[in-house]
């Protein structure tokens, strides 16, 4: 399971000739190949190699040190007969449903832990927080950020199903507080991923003007959900 959420840059210089979709396609392709072919590598090691491979594809033409170089958040899961491996980098979410029905969220909450004042301007975020110690990390051009991901392994027998969500889909719980992670998971399992996205869109539209819910800079955000039963 691989879910990437490309980080849309503001208008202006990114130091790169390529688009965010180009980057996520390259990174996603590398992750897909490596998770299958390199079973001996951990998910952080695989993410590091995939970032390095993608960076190598445009290192000669682009300024990869630019803070707005194309980048993405990452949610990964891989399983075998014995174990389920997981990894989350930045603000996507991975939910694990246990054999007893409990739902455990795997979250990289660095961005949420930053004071709102620190996020006042895009320039400030880029200069002091993005892929910086004390800030937050995304998959961009530096393979070492893979070591910052939230990652681990659980026995396969302890996982019944998984769901991976971009932060746009996770808004139902994280921003609009319509229900906890278990309620969100049960909705997706029962009604499908589209039902969650549709409900998020309804909430976003209703709050278009008031912006009653904090830390929501734009009305709509990309919303992707992947659900798997083991």
Image (cartoon, grey):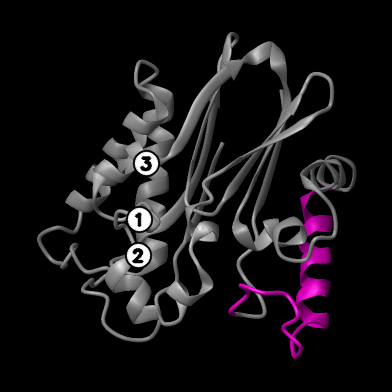
Query: Closer to the N terminus: mark 3 or mark 1?
Result: 1
Q: Which mark is residue 129?
A: 2
**Start and end of the magenta stretch?**
192-217
Q: CA distance from mark 1 to mark 2?
A: 7 Å
Quadrant including the N terminus: top right
* Mark 1 in CB contact with mark 2 (< 8 angstroms): yes
Quadrant including the C terminus: top right
Number of residue marks: 3
Q: Residue at x 75, y 80 (%)?
A: 212
| Nearest to the observer: residue 61 or residue 63 | 63
Residue beneath label 3, please?
A: 148
Left or right: 153 in relation to 149: right
Magenta-span inclusion, residue 202: yes
Could you tell me residue 229's position as x and y percent?
74, 28
Q: Residue at x 36, y 60 (%)?
A: 71
| Nearest to the observer: residue 148 or residue 14 | 148
Q: Give the vertical position of 181 relative to 223 (above or below).
A: above
State which mark lies toward you, 1 or 2: 1
Q: Give the vertical position of 112 relative to 3 (above or below).
A: below
Left or right: 11 in relation to 66: right
Q: Give the vertical position of 139 relative to 88 (above or below).
A: below
* Mark 3 in CB contact with mark 1 (< 8 angstroms): no
Q: Is residue 68 visible?
A: no
Query: Closer to the N terminus: mark 3 or mark 2?
Result: 2
Residue beneath label 1, please?
A: 134
Secondary structure at badge 1 equals: loop
Could you tell me residue 131's position as x and y percent?
31, 57
Could you tell me residue 162's position as x and y percent?
69, 33
Could you tell me residue 183's position as x and y percent?
85, 45
* Dot 2 crowding, Cα within 10 Å, few <14, some 14–19, many 20+: many
Q: CA distance from mark 3 to mark 2?
A: 14 Å
Q: Residue at x 36, y 48 (%)?
A: 27
């Amino acid at each position: 399971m691989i879910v990437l959420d490309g980080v849309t840059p503001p208008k202006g210089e990114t130091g790169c000739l390529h688009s965010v979709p180009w980057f996520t396609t390259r990174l996603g392709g590398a992750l897909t190949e490596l998770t299958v072919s390199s079973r001996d590598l951990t998910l952080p090691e695989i993410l590091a190699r995939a970032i390095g491979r993608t960076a190598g594809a445009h290192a000669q033409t682009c300024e990869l040190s630019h803070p707005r170089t194309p980048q993405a958040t990452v949610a990964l899961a891989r399983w075998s007969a014995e174990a389920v491996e997981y990894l989350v980098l930045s603000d996507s979410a991975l939910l694990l449903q246990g054999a007893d029905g409990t739902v455990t969220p795997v979250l990289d909450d660095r961005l949420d832990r930053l004071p709102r004042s620190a996020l006042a301007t895009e320039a400030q975020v880029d200069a002091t927080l993005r892929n910086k110690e004390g800030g937050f990390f995304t998959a961009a051009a530096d393979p070492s950020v893979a070591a910052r991901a939230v990652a681990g392994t659980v026995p396969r027998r302890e996982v019944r199903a998984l769901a991976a969500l971009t932060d746009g889909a996770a808004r139902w719980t994280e921003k609009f507080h319509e229900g906890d992670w278990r309620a969100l998971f049960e909705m997706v399992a029962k009604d499908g991923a589209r039902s969650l996205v549709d409900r998020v869109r309804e909430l976003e539209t209703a709050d278009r003007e008031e912006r009653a819910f904090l830390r929501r800079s734009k009305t709509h955000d990309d919303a992707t959900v992947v659900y798997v039963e083991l």
